[in-house]
Image (tube, rainbow, N blue to C red):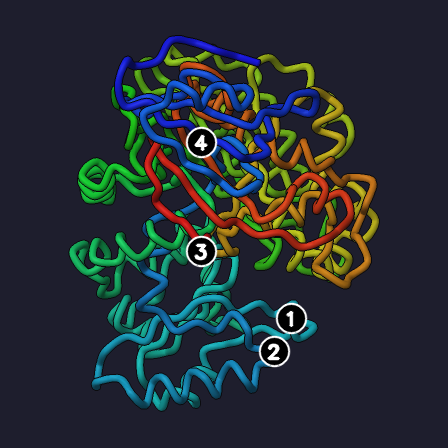
Amino acid sequence: MTAGAGSLRGLIAWTDAHWLVSPAEAATTVLTDADGRICAVGGDELADGADRVERLGGRFGSAGLWDSHLHWMGLAEQASRLDVTAVGSLADLYAKVAEAAAALPPGEVLVGAGWNQNRWGGGWPDRAGLDRAARGRPVVLWARDHHGLVASSAALEMAWGGADPVDPPGGRYERCQGQLTGLVRETAANDLAARLPSLPIGALQAQLPAIAERLSRLGLVGATGMEPGRWLSPLEAFLTERQAFRTQVFVTDGEAGFTSPPAPWFRVVGAKRFADGALGTRTAALSAPYADGTGSGVWRIAPEELAAVVARAAAEGCGAVAVHAIGDAAAAAVLRHLAGLPRTHSGVAHRLEHAQLMDPEAVAQMGRAEGLVASVQPVHLLEDRAAMDQAWPDRAGWSFPHASLARAGVPLLLGSDAPIETPDPVVGMQAAVWRARDGEVPWQPQEALTPWQALDGYTRHPAAADQRQGGRLAAGGWADFTLYDRDPIQALAHRQPFAVVGTVVAGRWVHRAF
């Protein structure tokens, strides 16, 4: 066991527990000090000299769970949007739009999110359908993957004032026989949204307490956010004052990123860029066309420009670079440039985001590259499995290649991409190990992670990649813990349910359900 010196006063013994230290090591007691750090990990005897004893009733505990990819701003916006995630047909989608639009004041834009044409076997929504449903009101509905949207005629008119929209680099306003269909993809979708009224920052900021409480109840002690620059100050102010949830940020806009000094509650670690789009909107950049005849995807950054864009983002003082790459062509191109980047001054690792489709040579290349990590979201495969079988059936075995990446020696950082998927890390670990929802047949099971690999993806690997003092039950680390009702390793191994029952951050309870 590990041990170290703690404060002379304020020692807390977290005991009568099964602490999951490593596959070869367990403990019954963790001793923490008044500064919110671990000072010893071991047996029951550590409780003898404590000032306070927290008896955990034989429950299981791990280092605190960390979501390595979510969107605070997206979660804040979610509360004000029409949720169409569960609709199972175009008719149902338009019915929900009609109901919501009828309740809005005249002229107000109806904004929704979550539709997925793969749920009803194809067939895209369009502006004509929205026009009929909303009776001429402005409507914008983001696709589930947030890499495209569908807009009504009134929304297009409000954005462009009757002018014909211009396709920006890396995006498209879709047309049929020269007429706008209402489908807008990639950078064009962001362009359209920027031309419409948006919620004020204050309204979004008001959602932060509820979001933080929700994440804590799920067992998360911190997260890596992918956020626009204008959101940094409100987010930092909230987290620093609250001191109960840790966040680091990759900035998604601006010519280059930047870093902020290390701090326990909030820091900026670098820049995020997008190489391509996503599977749902058929904009992930592929080396061969989609099997359903929808093309080969969209490059948000042209391949010949990737080197310059990545170099600018990684300029001295700008920290780490995280590059979104979902299609196999995008992943291969991004790897060529990330592999040549020097290590950051802070030691924070450069990241390939998503890595949803990678051929075996790209996996091997990433394993040979020093200092690169893969930030992946196994929870995406629960919804995407049918779409992948439709879109790239000949390459389905290359999808979500988590076990292959792990065998190649690539550290895996697990996350959710919330609000696109649930931020629940239990669901994330189950998806990583089971490769299916409960009751479904595992999808491409050869790429399943082991239970310990899944837990490491939420604890040890992200802390090491981010140069944080969490992620492990060891002396000197942050006293951040997640507690479970049963052994999560055994539950994952035997495909049984388990639940989070407690969350501790800096040695303080932030959630307790027993």
Position of 343 relative to 68 (above/below): above
Q: Which residue is mark 4?
A: 14
Report if residue 268 is visible in the image: yes
Residue 447 horizontal/vertical position (percent) = 77, 39
The kind of secondary structure element at disc 4 is strand
Mark found first going from the N terminus, 1 or 4: 4
> Which residue position holds label 1?
119
Q: CA distance from mark 1 to mark 4?
A: 46 Å
Crowdedness of circle 1 by 10 Å Cα count: few (<14), some, many (20+)? some
- In percent of width and height, residue 165 lies at 36, 63
Depicted 248 relative to depicted 467: above or below: below
Q: Determine which residue is flagged by label 3.
A: 419
Q: Horizontal and vertical percent for residue 19?
A: 57, 30
Tell me if label 4 and label 3 are in contact, CB under 8 Å: no
Between circles 4 and 3, the one closer to the viewer is 4
Q: Earlier in the sequence, mark 4 or mark 2?
A: 4
Q: CA distance from mark 3 to mark 1?
A: 18 Å
Q: CB under 8 Å between callouts 2 and 1? A: yes
Closer to the camera: disc 3 or disc 1? 3
Cα distance in 3D space between marks 2 and 3: 19 Å
Residue 360 vertical placement versus 429 (above, below): above
**Which is more N-terminal, label 1 or label 3?**
1
Location of residue 75 with respect to 178 vertically, above or below:
above
Dot 1 falls on a residue whose secondary structure is helix
**Marked residue nearer the N-terminal end (4 or 3):** 4
Is the Cβ of the residue at disc 1 closer than 8 Å to that at disc 4? no
**In which quadrant of the rendered view does residue 39 lie?**
top left
Kind of residue at disc 4: Trp
